[in-house]
Image: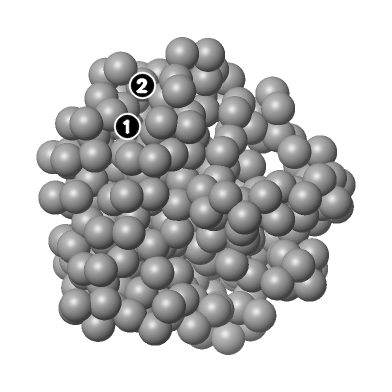
Amino acid sequence: MSGLRSAIDALDTESYSSTTTSGPTLVAPSSQQREVASDDRPPISMIGRVDALLEVLKGQERPMSISDLALCTGIPKATVSRIAAELVDRGLLERQAAGLRLGLRLFELGEHASRPTSLRRLALVRMARLRKVTQQTVNLAVLERDEIVHIAILRSPATPPLPTRVGGRLPAYATGLGKALLSYLPDRRVCELVPDPVVGVGPRTVGDRASLLDQLAMVRTAGVAYEREEFAADVACVAALVPGADGRPIAALSVSAHAHLANLQQLGVEVRAVADLLARDASKHRLVAADERRR
């Protein structure tokens, strides 16, 4: 899991998408990071400790000191120092005057992560054509447990700015992409993954698991997933599954647009058509879904 996370988070398609930042800031650890860093549950294994350090560093725009890393992960400072030195030697971390940050070798590993890289290469031309036809932002994502991970984003100036990035994660239940991907799973598995009640993300996030299951049933019938302002205000999304060579979904494709201006039904026709073409491409190249992780 940690290898895939580091690899995907290192991927970048800035030539197709762009984001703006106001300057370097130290980002507070996410809920997932705080869980890893809980004082009474510090990681014990070496792999767990490396994963915890990389998880904290990935959310930072500026270097972090050994002391800060120890504080955020719950790992003893001397252990952090020893692990960090070895990771620096291997290029996985870079040491700067202000501290440590992720190294270039992680980007190189990300570029060789077979499934997302193959998917991106296979999908980008189709996505570019879909953006041209719809004049809206086009997204491609995979499901990892209860979250979606964006592996490609082709932005459009006609779409409201979205707080998303390649490698970024979002709760699956609050996005069209996630609902498309969750619709393939049996309800029992969805109940294991999604909390009840769910945590609100946007102004109209689905409120409970029962409502989500009803929505997923409609997705299975319609073949597309619709979402209005569940993820962000004034943003709507329509998404469809992309099956692999074995019939299991390898990703979901979506178009994002203004919630009050877009004709989602028409966008759904376009998305479904391109998703079908991608499925044909995936079958030709024998791309299959990865086994579900972290059961």
Task: Determine the CA span between mark 1 and mark 2.
Answer: 6 Å
Quick check: can you spot residue 68?
A: no
- Dot 1: few (<14), some (14–19), or many (≥20) neighbours within 10 Å? many
Q: Is residue 127 left or right of residue 2?
A: left
Q: Earlier in the sequence, mark 1 or mark 2?
A: 1
Q: Is residue 210 left or right of residue 203?
A: right
Mark 1 touching mark 2, by CB under 8 A? yes
**Residue 104 position in % (x across, y down):** 19, 61
Residue 164 occupies quadrant: top left
Callout 2 amino acid: Thr
**Residue 97 position in % (x across, y down):** 26, 46
Callout 1 amino acid: Thr
Quick check: can you spot residue 237?
A: yes
Instruction: Name the residue nearer the viewer: 32 or 191.
Output: 191
User: Which residue in the protein does label 2 denote?
Assistant: 159
**Residue 248 position in % (x across, y down):** 46, 76
When the figure is inspected, residue 178 is found, relative to residue 243, above or below; the finding is: above
- Dot 2: few (<14), some (14–19), or many (≥20) neighbours within 10 Å? many
When the figure is inspected, residue 157 is found, relative to residue 61, above or below; the finding is: above
**Residue 285 position in % (x across, y down):** 19, 78
Residue beneath the point at 85% across and 51% down? 210
User: Which residue in the protein does label 1 denote?
Assistant: 137
Instruction: Name the residue nearer the viewer: 58 or 201.
Output: 201
Which residue reaches farthest top?
261
- Chosen colour scheme: one colour
